[in-house]
Image (cartoon, coloured by chain):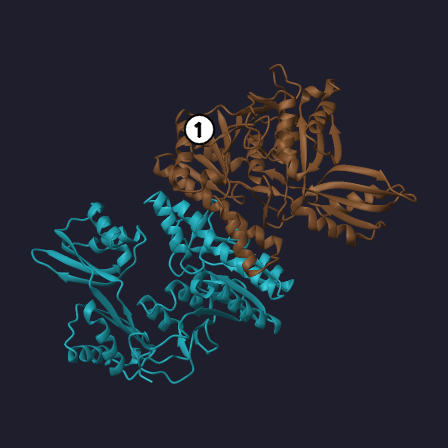
Chain colours: A brown, B cyan
Amino acid sequence: MLIVKKFGGTSVADKERIFHVAGRCAEEYKKGNDIVVVLSAMGKYTDELIEKARDINPNPPKREMDMLFTIGEQMSVSLMAMAMNQLGVPAVSLNAFQVPMYTTSNYGSARLKRIDSDRIRNELENRRIVIVTGFQGVNKYNDYTTLGRGGSDTTAVALAAVLHADACEIYTDVDGVYTADPRIVRTARKMAEITYDEMLDLATLGAGVLHNRSVEMAKKYGVPLVVRSSLNDAEGTVIKEEVKVERMLITGVALDKNADRISVIGLKDEPGIAFKLFDTLAKKNINVDVILQSIGRNNTKDISFTVADTDLEEAVQAIRESGRFAYDEVKYKTDIAKLSVVGAGMMSNPGVAAKMFESLYNEGININMISTSEIRVTVLIEEKDAEKAMNAVHEAFGLAE
Amino acid sequence: MLIVKKFGGTSVADKERIFHVAGRCAEEYKKGNDIVVVLSAMGKYTDELIEKARDINPNPPKREMDMLFTIGEQMSVSLMAMAMNQLGVPAVSLNAFQVPMYTTSNYGSARLKRIDSDRIRNELENRRIVIVTGFQGVNKYNDYTTLGRGGSDTTAVALAAVLHADACEIYTDVDGVYTADPRIVRTARKMAEITYDEMLDLATLGAGVLHNRSVEMAKKYGVPLVVRSSLNDAEGTVIKEEVKVERMLITGVALDKNADRISVIGLKDEPGIAFKLFDTLAKKNINVDVILQSIGRNNTKDISFTVADTDLEEAVQAIRESGRFAYDEVKYKTDIAKLSVVGAGMMSNPGVAAKMFESLYNEGININMISTSEIRVTVLIEEKDAEKAMNAVHEAFGLAE
């Protein structure tokens, strides 16, 4: 078996945890498996680096930020190799140059383009555990890039894809994917299996366990994903193309409190306006979600949509500076939350949205915007109502244990 | 003018010093010069990394140590680029992969083999200050290597050589090369000029300002070196092939307290014994100095020599485990010091050694071993006498200001 294992920052935060991970990998190595480990930077190290940089330059060049960021993962992988060596297991650490892993050129939010697997294969053939830096890549200029949020998960899935790994295990501080965030919904239940599409919607909608990019990539290349805890040996949740068990109507409930709403008021009601608006944002690499268009007055219309709160400022500025379309006003609201129910079962069941709205109505929660896809229903609500709403919906669909 | 400037760890230890260096470089850049900056890791960061590693593995693999070490310089160069950017000067940081700088394969003590200058030249043509990681390289396996002691100086000189730089400035915490260590000899005088050979002997003998590898390389490629202070604008000392000023008999006095003496007693008096002994040490990359061979009893001989104190243990062990030659006993002594007088002028003046011995005799200092070359005389003395001896010799040759 060839297994790719990804451990996040908390799993390698200190000496003890490093040895815990090293021991776990050593065990599986000794059974004869080939092990590739992908690591993030230790604990809060990336935050420390951001602070160091900002202290010197409040608005540092992105190229240099990526140059600085990459040392975090390089520290993790070299220390992990030393720990495995200490346990008597041969191991070698590799950074983005050494693999190599090529990406697009945009610093801070690059996408993986090509991974050469020769070096890793050679090391595996020599029976070494291979420890690879997550989150980072090299662009065509031979400069370091980073993959943005969830980057290390993406690295792990991509490596599993090019190596045709038997499994890609993502270790986190929760022991699987739940029907809702168990910190908010006490009765949330861990799922044994879930499809890529369901996970994709959960991830996109803020379930937080996996980043959507890594799930998209896993789906595209058919990489079997497992989400499990780095702290215990519980089974975790398997994510794959099809699940065999009888499906519930709804798989899970996801909450995203990091969304902000932007409304562009008084756009001209003519063809191409929506294109110009969202193209302006796309060119800045800003993802938008939950789009709502409404008729305004005097041949105008209003378009509202949500963006991640980290993108709010840039998005508003981009709209104001664009000059490609006329409008009256840009408004935004930050104290909102996105609540979604997700499930492949809802495709053949028209009552899902109604049931969700009813459960919110019963709690006196106002719905701000609505968006639906084949396998999900998303509503925008006030942030203060978020946890009450999540519990209500979770119960309404009988997801509790 | 193309100028290579090297700053050590203390010069980039914190935000203030980083901006001091950035400002200094920006000033010269604005005059129209092309600037290449070589940096070490910040302050004591390399020591911190060693501690981190040892905590996990007391005897970490050298390959992984180098992987860990290189992040120190990468942090320095990216933060420096941000500082220059903050000052409005375009700058780009490059690590060993990006230049690239190729070395031999021995981790921890690699030697530079080849530097591609294309990337640096392109960046300079685009009017950017180029900031390069010192101390590190990449070997034929695409693994990181480090250059060992004085590595960043060597990087700077090598870059100056391949770029045909007009000057290679080494910034340190002293403002030039002195006739003796000014912390020990109060009357020591800063020299305006000194030849490569003299500097080489001073460096080898523990003057501490520059590592001999960097001076050797500067001599080989004719790179004009300047040693000057990062704290003030004083002129510094120029090191070159020939100096025009009327030469003093002696250029300087050097003291090395980090030398230990090893004696191998009762070696067979037959051809090849010295070769086998020193070959054994050379294979371990251990440099020896001040060799003395004396006749023992019964067709045996004793060989004594000095090594750096960091090599003592490995040297003694290598001799004991070699099996290539028979001997009675290995002894060593650690409380010794090497005192040397250096000067191109002494070649034509036979009285130098005698004068040195006389000044030591006047102070009642016992000489343990003697070694001479064309431009230096070195004696081994008790460590406790070192400073008194240095002052006596410095005065005897009239080196004081």
Residue A166 in view, yes or no: no
Q: Nearer the viewer, residue A358 or A134?
A: A358
Residue A378 in view, yes or no: yes
Name the side, left or right, on which A178 lies relative to B197: right
Picture layout, residue A107 above or below residue B152: above
Pinpoint residue A163: horizontal percent, then vertical percent: 55, 30
Q: Dot 1, crowdedness within 10 Å: few (<14), some or many (≥20)?
A: few
Name the side, left or right, on which A165 lies relative to B355: right
Pinpoint residue B388: horizontal percent, then vertical percent: 22, 75
Name the side, left or right, on which A49 lies relative to B366: right
**Which amino acid type corresponds to the residue marked 1 in the rendered image?**
Asn
Q: Nearer the viewer, residue B25 or A261?
A: A261
Pinpoint residue B164: horizontal percent, then vertical percent: 54, 66
Q: Nearer the viewer, residue A99 or B52?
A: B52
Identify the residue at horizontal 70%, vertical 45% (top origin).
A285
The answer for which chain carries disc 1 is A
Picture layout, residue A163 above or below residue B337: above
Pinpoint residue A175: horizontal percent, then vertical percent: 50, 28
Q: Which residue is mark 1?
A: A232
